[in-house]
Image (cartoon, rainbow, N blue to C red):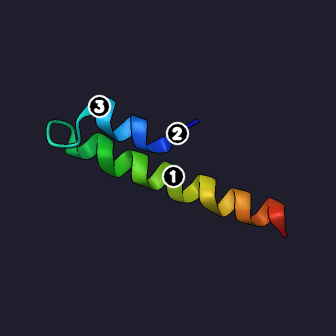
Amino acid sequence: MNRSNIRTVNGSRHNVNLERCFIKIQNLAAAALDALDE
């Protein structure tokens, strides 16, 4: 799954709140993956 596609499809200019939401989700996902790697 390519995360960059999410931003381009939704259009961050029109959906600033969604963009912020996706950033939070990405941070949570990254933290989860880091925890699994450890």
| Farthest residue, direction top | 9
Camera-nearest label, 2 or 1: 2
Examine the image and state in which quarter residue 15 appears: top left
Give the mark nearer the N terminus: 3 vs 1. Answer: 3
Q: Mark 2: which secondary structure?
A: loop
Query: Mark 1 highlights which residue?
Result: 26
Q: Is residue 13 above or below residue 31?
A: above
Apparent side of residue 29 relative to residue 5 in the rendered image (left or right): right
Q: Is residue 36 above or below residue 14?
A: below
Q: Residues within 10 Å of mark 2 (few under 14, many from 20)?
A: few
Examine the image and state in which quarter residue 18 appears: top left
How many marks are shown on the rendered structure? Answer: 3
Q: Amino acid at mark 1?
A: Gln
Q: Position of residue 31 (x, y in %)?
A: 64, 63
Q: Are marks 2 and 1 in contact (CB under 8 Å)?
A: no
Q: Amino acid at mark 3?
A: Asn
Q: Mark 3: which secondary structure?
A: helix
Give the mark nearer the N terminus: 2 vs 3. Answer: 2
Q: Residues within 10 Å of mark 3 (few under 14, many from 20)?
A: few
Q: Is residue 12 above or below residue 37?
A: above
Query: Mark 3 highlights which residue?
Result: 10
Looking at the image, which residue is at 72% across and 65% down? 34
Query: Mark 2 highlights which residue?
Result: 2
Q: Which circle marks residue 17 in the picture?
A: none
Apparent side of residue 6 relative to residue 9 in the rendered image (left or right): right
